[in-house]
Image (cartoon, rainbow, N blue to C red):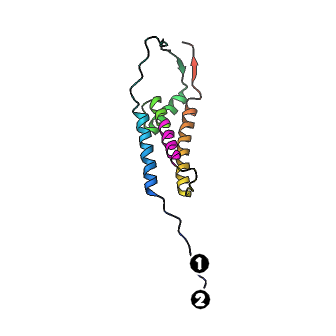
Amino acid sequence: MPNLKSYSQPPTPDLSAIIAMLTDAVQALRNVSCPSEPEELPDKEIVPADEIRCYRFSPLAVRCEQELFAEQQAKNLHDLFFKASSSITAFTALLEHIDAEAEVEGVVIHILARELRRVEDLLFKIQDTYSTVEPVEA
C-alpha cells in the first residue's frame, strides 16, 4: 500500500472576528465624520484672529489638484484630507483589534498591506500636488 500524505487545509478565517473588526472600523469612521458638539470656549480665553494667507499655484499644480479631486471624488482640499485621515483611522482600528499573539493568514496581511499602500499613494499624490505651491506676499 503506497504511503499517502495527508494535506491539511489552512484554517478558514474567523468570520465573526473579521465582522467585529469591520464594525469597529465603521464606528471609528462615524466618530471622525460626526464629531461631538464643539467645546465652548471659556469667557476669559482670547480667541486669535483669523489669518489670511496667499499662495501661488503653478498651472501644473492646478491641473494635478483638479485630477486628484476627481480621482478621489473630493470637492476640495478639506475633503481630500478627510478621506486620507478616515482611511488611516479605519486601518488603525483594524490593526488595533488584532491580538498581539495571533497568527495572521497571508491573505489578511495582503489585504492590509494593499489598503496601507492605497493610503500611502493618496498621501504621496497630495504631497506631490502641493509641492510647487508657494506662499506669496499679499
Which region shows up in magenta? 85-97
Report which residue position mark 1 lands on: 5
Q: What's the CA distance linking mark 2 and mark 1?
A: 12 Å
Foreground of the two, 26 or 51: 26
Determine the residue positioned at 51% across, 43% down. 91
Which quadrant of the figure contains the C terminus?
A: top right
Foreground of the two, 132 or 83: 83
Determine the residue positioned at 56% across, 55% down. 104
**Tag 2: residue type?**
Met
Q: Position of residue 50 (x, y in %)?
A: 48, 14
Which quadrant of the figure contains the N terminus?
A: bottom right
Q: Mark 1 packing: few (<14 Cα in 10 Å), some, or many (20+)?
A: few
Determine the residue positioned at 58% across, 53% down. 101
Q: Position of residue 55 (x, y in %)?
A: 54, 20
Q: Position of residue 52 (x, y in %)?
A: 50, 15
Report which residue position mark 2 lands on: 1
**Tag 1: residue type?**
Lys
Q: Mark 2 packing: few (<14 Cα in 10 Å), some, or many (20+)?
A: few
Residue 16: quadrant of the picture: bottom left
